[in-house]
Image: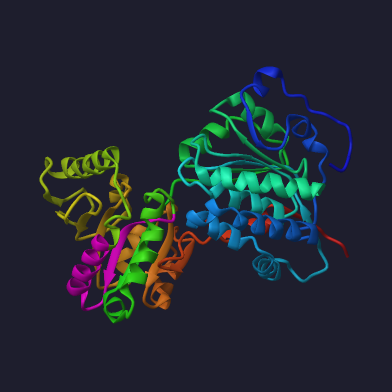
């Protein structure tokens, strides 16, 4: 590791014993404040990530996990160069990384930690990443490749740390105290807990709170598809691949057009066939979905499976449970859609379903900062009036099948601007 200084910030033994290192060492972590920032998208970083991409794809196990393969594809040189062209301003400013970044990755999406790490690296920053406590195989594959590349390119030794520890405010305090950017994934409760640990006055938090997402399907366009199996695969990747736990996974399916009944029949039957032998639901998931459904109905109409919801100052809303062949698909039909109903959402194939004849009828659902991604099949221009109406939600509009495609503009943040500082040189 290049020596940038010998100042140490000592971690006491009690904290050390609670941390498991998947990448990096205690000795280097205690010197993290000596680690300099780089310019964003510098050549050393691009080369390092390209080597990492190749190293991951050499592992036969990586090919068995689409999320790992997608990550490796995303960090290859050609893609990072495209990002560089998009995100670096052509002006007289000097842009540099802000400094040490501390990442709390979500517990329910295996590869999210890696995208968070790379976001920091391409912005020129050292990174300490707390990976999920759950031992995903995907984490092991990426950590192994990362360690192999660091051995061959020691410029990044002491700049990258993957660590695992149980919830511990003492460790959070230590790491928060020495970072310039703290990235918190995992929802509102996690954010509140981590924010109890102070950061430096000029440090900043980037937070990814609880969100929900929507899929919009134009029935006319769906019935025109020549390869519906590919569409099923795209929908599956957006939803079932992560057990619908990702904030990008649609919880509401909005149907549009004048062939809705035919499109619904074809789509749900096709999805049911696609899921056979591919998605196995666990008992706890089935119980949770059933519980959410009964909570929804009991909240409004004593648990009936067809209920008229008539809240004060709200339109009458008829909700129905649409029974499928098994519990891999649970559909709840609603006549009106707003953000209130989202408190009863669930995962693992649990969908609210709404027939739409006016895009502006989605306004109540989308006028909420918790509304994140709108995925679609059809014409994206349909949503312009909705966005321009001044809604507080929808940070991304992407084709169905692309919701999990990570970008440096995410959740309404421009991560390059958030994680770099500008030197105004005149």
Q: How is the image coloured?
A: rainbow
Residue 251 among magenta residues: yes
Residue 296 among magenta residues: no
Closest to the observer: 98 or 21? 21
Horizontal side, residue 312 vs residue 240: left or right: left
Q: Which residues are magenta?
A: 248-273
Q: Quadrant of residue 258?
A: bottom left
Is 154 above or below relative to 53? above
Picture residue at 56% right of the left edge, 34% below the top: 194
The quadrant the N terminus occupies is top right
Picture residue at 48% right of the left edge, 36% below the top: 134
Percent x, y for residue 191? 52, 38
Q: Among all residues in the image, which is located at the extreme top?
A: 14
Is 203 above or below relative to 172? below
Q: Quadrant of residue 201?
A: top right
Horizontal side, residue 361 vs residue 28: left or right: left
Horizontal side, residue 154 vs residue 290: left or right: right
Closest to the observer: 281 or 207? 281
Percent x, y for residue 109? 48, 47
Q: Quadrant of residue 426?
A: bottom right
Q: Is residue 205 visible?
A: no
Is 68 above or below relative to 78? above
Is 318 above or below relative to 228? above
Picture residue at 32% right of the left edge, 80% below the top: 226
Percent x, y for residue 417? 68, 58
Percent x, y for residue 254? 29, 65
Picture residue at 57% right of the left edge, 57% below the top: 71
Q: Is residue 295 visible?
A: yes
């Amino acid at each position: 590791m290049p020596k940038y200084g010998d100042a140490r910030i000592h971690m006491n033994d009690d904290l050390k014993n609670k941390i498991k290192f998947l990448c990096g060492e205690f000795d280097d972590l205690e010197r993290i404040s000596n680690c300099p920032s780089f310019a964003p998208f510098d050549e050393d970083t691009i080369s390092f990530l390209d080597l990492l991409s190749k190293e991951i794809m050499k592992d036969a196990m990586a090919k068995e996990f689409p999320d790992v393969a997608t990550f490796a594809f995303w960090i290859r040189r050609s893609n990072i160069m495209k990002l560089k062209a998009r995100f670096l301003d052509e002006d007289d400013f000097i842009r540099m990384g802000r400094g040490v970044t501390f990442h709390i990755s979500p517990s329910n999406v295996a590869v999210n930690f890696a995208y968070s790490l790379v976001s920091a690296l391409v912005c020129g920053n050292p990174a300490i990443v707390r990976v999920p406590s759950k031992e995903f195989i995907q984490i092991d594959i990426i950590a192994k490749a990362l360690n192999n590349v660091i051995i061959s390119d020691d410029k990044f030794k002491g700049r990258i740390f993957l660590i695992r520890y149980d919830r511990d405010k003492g460790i959070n305090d230590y790491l928060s105290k020495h970072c310039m950017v703290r990235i918190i994934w995992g929802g509102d409760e996690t954010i509140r807990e981590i924010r109890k640990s102070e950061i430096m006055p000029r440090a900043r938090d980037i937070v990814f709170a609880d969100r929900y997402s929507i899929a919009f399907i134009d029935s006319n366009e769906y019935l025109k598809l020549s390869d519906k199996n590919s569409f099923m695969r795209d929908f599956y990747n957006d939803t079932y691949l992560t057990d619908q736990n990702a904030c990008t996974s649609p919880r509401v399916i909005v149907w549009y057009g004048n062939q809705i009944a035919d499109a619904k029949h074809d789509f749900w039957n096709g999805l049911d066939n696609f899921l056979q032998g591919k998605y196995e639901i666990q008992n706890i998931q089935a119980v949770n979905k059933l519980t959410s459904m009964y909570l929804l109905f009991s909240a409004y109409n004593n648990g009936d499976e067809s209920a008229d919801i008539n809240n004060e100052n709200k339109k009458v809303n008829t909700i129905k449970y649409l029974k499928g062949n098994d519990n891999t698909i649970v559909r709840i039909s609603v006549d009106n859609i707003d953000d209130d109903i989202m408190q009863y959402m669930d995962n693992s194939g649990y969908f609210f379903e709404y027939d739409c004849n006016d895009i502006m009828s989605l306004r109540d659902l989308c006028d909420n900062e918790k509304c994140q991604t709108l995925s679609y099949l059809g014409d994206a221009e349909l949503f312009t009036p909705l966005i321009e109406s001044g809604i507080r939600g929808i940070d991304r509009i992407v084709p169905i099948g692309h919701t999990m495609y990570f970008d440096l503009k995410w959740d309404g943040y421009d991560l390059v601007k958030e994680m770099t500082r500008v030197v105004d040189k005149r």
